[in-house]
């Protein structure tokens, strides 16, 4: 049983009150009030979707992290070796254990997703704490971890992006208020009107019955891809708009992913802060390590291995099951294939062997690639909400 009966989400009246409190206190007290109001309202919001077991998990995730960060802060000689590795592994273990042991089911969707994004912030701060020069403030750390704008589902911010909000002097303009209102209205329409149309329509177990027809297949195939975009991007639109009203800027997380024509383009448009995080904390360090080891003659081999590692991790981050791992494998192969094709096109272009298409043919080519890729990538999202055996059985019977 949660401390407060109904979990607060961005489409709720309670969240609007939280934003109003943050806004009013900021208008009276200025930017210096932001860390205090964000920490207090974030703690209140978290209390609405955790029970006592989840509270213990939250304490296990936050308390050790706080003391380790203070130990590392501005001390590069301390952030080397086993302590840093153990701290990162501890954060991963806390998140993983909630999924493996079934605590995630008891906690609910808000708690699990919130802990996932909190883990990203914690690991990012662990890796950057030793390089910090500004004094450590506990209230900044708490507001970073429990920020109500990013608590449930991101977007993923860095420590620098967060604390910069407290030093920048922002004044509301008519245009900024219009932008905020547009984002909030658009997000709420996505979440409350459009997304529910597609929610629950992607159950492939129903397609294993003899009554399933072509329309059932079409709806189930595309529903989760559409639902996830509407629900997730709608959430981000709302919190970005609310942040603008409160003088708090959040990074963009989506850039029209339905216009992507390949996997590389897709991940430059879809959940962009997740891609930036993995690039900074997994891809780049792994690539540097592989190149320094001189195990491979070609830099491209190291790039391919780092890309595969990133997308396998993205797959299992979604869940500890074969369907999530397969999702990661498909996207890893897709990104690697796109990278290799791009290299080949570049070689042909340099050799003068790449024929330029006319405007009409270029538009036709773009349209064909767009449709083909969107159909394919929608199929990969089927795996995020159906286990592999269910999908396979539906395919066999279909």
Image (spheres, rainbow, N blue to C red):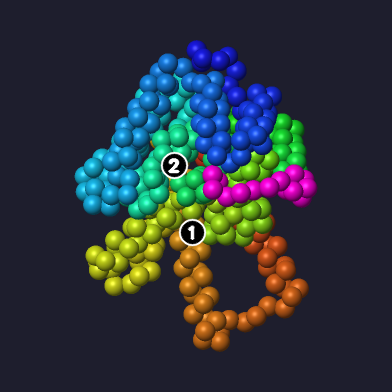
Q: Pick the residue in front: 208 or 89.
A: 89
Name the quadrant containing residue 120.
Answer: top left
**Residue 159, image x and y in percent?**
45, 46
Name the quadrant containing residue 8.
Answer: top right
Q: In this view, does 338 lie above or below 166?
A: below
Q: How many marks?
A: 2
Cα separation, mark 2 vs mark 1, equals 25 Å
Q: Residue at the location (66% across, 44% down)?
A: 244
Residue at which label 1 appears: 335
Quick one: label 2, few (<14), some, or many (20+) residues within 10 Å? some
**Residue 115, image x and y in percent?**
45, 32
- Which image quarter holds the C terminus? top right
Q: In this rendering, does residue 391 appear at all?
A: no
- What span is colored magenta in the figure? 165-179
Query: Could you tell me which secondary element the residue under label 2 belongs to?
Result: helix
**Residue 325, image x and y in percent?**
42, 43
In the rendered structure, which disc, 2 or 1, sits on the residue that comes first in sequence? 2
Q: Residue at the location (21% across, 48% down)?
A: 81
Quick one: label 1, few (<14), some, or many (20+) residues within 10 Å? many
- As drawn, is 157 to the left or to the right of 95? right
Q: Pick the residue in front: 204 or 83.
A: 83
Q: Does the magenta stretch include residue 362?
A: no
Residue at which label 2 appears: 121
**Residue 237, image x and y in percent?**
66, 42
- As drawn, is 110 to the left or to the right of 81? right
Q: Residue at the location (56% across, 28% down)?
A: 41
Query: Could you tell me which secondary element the residue under label 1 belongs to?
Result: helix
Q: Pick the residue in front: 301 or 159.
A: 159
Q: In this rendering, does residue 84 appear at all?
A: yes
């Amino acid at each position: 049983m949660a401390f407060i009966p109904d979990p607060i989400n961005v489409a709720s009246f309670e969240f609007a009150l939280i934003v109003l409190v943050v806004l009013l206190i900021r208008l009276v007290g200025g930017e210096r009030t932001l860390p205090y109001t964000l920490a207090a309202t974030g703690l209140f919001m978290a209390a609405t979707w955790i029970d006592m077991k989840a509270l213990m998990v939250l304490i296990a995730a936050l308390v050790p992290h706080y003391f380790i960060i203070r130990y590392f802060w501005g001390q590069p000689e301390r952030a080397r070796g086993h302590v840093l590795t153990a701290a990162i592994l501890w954060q991963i273990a806390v998140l993983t254990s909630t999924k493996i042991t079934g605590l995630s089911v008891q906690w609910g969707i808000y708690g699990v997703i919130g802990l996932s994004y909190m883990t990203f912030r914690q690991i990012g701060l662990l890796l950057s704490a030793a390089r910090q020069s500004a004094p450590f403030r506990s209230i900044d750390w708490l507001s970073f971890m429990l920020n109500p704008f990013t608590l449930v589902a991101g977007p993923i911010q860095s420590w620098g992006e967060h604390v910069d909000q407290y030093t920048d002097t922002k004044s509301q303009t008519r245009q900024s208020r219009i932008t905020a209102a547009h984002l909030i209205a658009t997000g709420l329409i996505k979440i409350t009107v459009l997304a529910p149309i597609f929610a629950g329509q992607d159950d492939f177990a129903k397609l294993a019955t003899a009554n399933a027809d072509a329309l059932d297949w079409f709806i189930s195939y595309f529903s989760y891809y559409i639902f996830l975009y509407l629900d997730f991007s709608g959430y981000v639109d709302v919190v970005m708009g609310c942040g603008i009203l409160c003088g708090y800027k959040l990074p963009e997380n989506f850039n029209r992913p339905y216009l992507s024509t390949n996997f590389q383009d897709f991940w430059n448009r879809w959940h962009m802060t997740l891609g930036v995080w993995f690039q900074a904390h997994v891809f780049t360090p792994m690539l540097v390590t592989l190149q320094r080891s001189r195990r491979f003659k070609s830099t491209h081999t190291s790039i391919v291995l780092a890309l595969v590692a990133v997308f396998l991790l993205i797959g299992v981050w979604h869940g500890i099951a074969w369907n999530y791992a397969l999702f990661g494998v498909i996207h890893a192969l897709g990104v690697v294939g796109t990278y290799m094709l791009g290299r080949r096109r570049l070689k042909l272009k340099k050799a003068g062997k790449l024929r330029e298409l006319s405007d009409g043919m270029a538009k036709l080519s773009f349209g064909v690639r767009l449709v083909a890729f969107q159909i394919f990538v929608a199929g990969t999202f089927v795996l995020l909400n159906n286990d592999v055996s269910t999908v396979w059985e539906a395919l066999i019977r279909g």
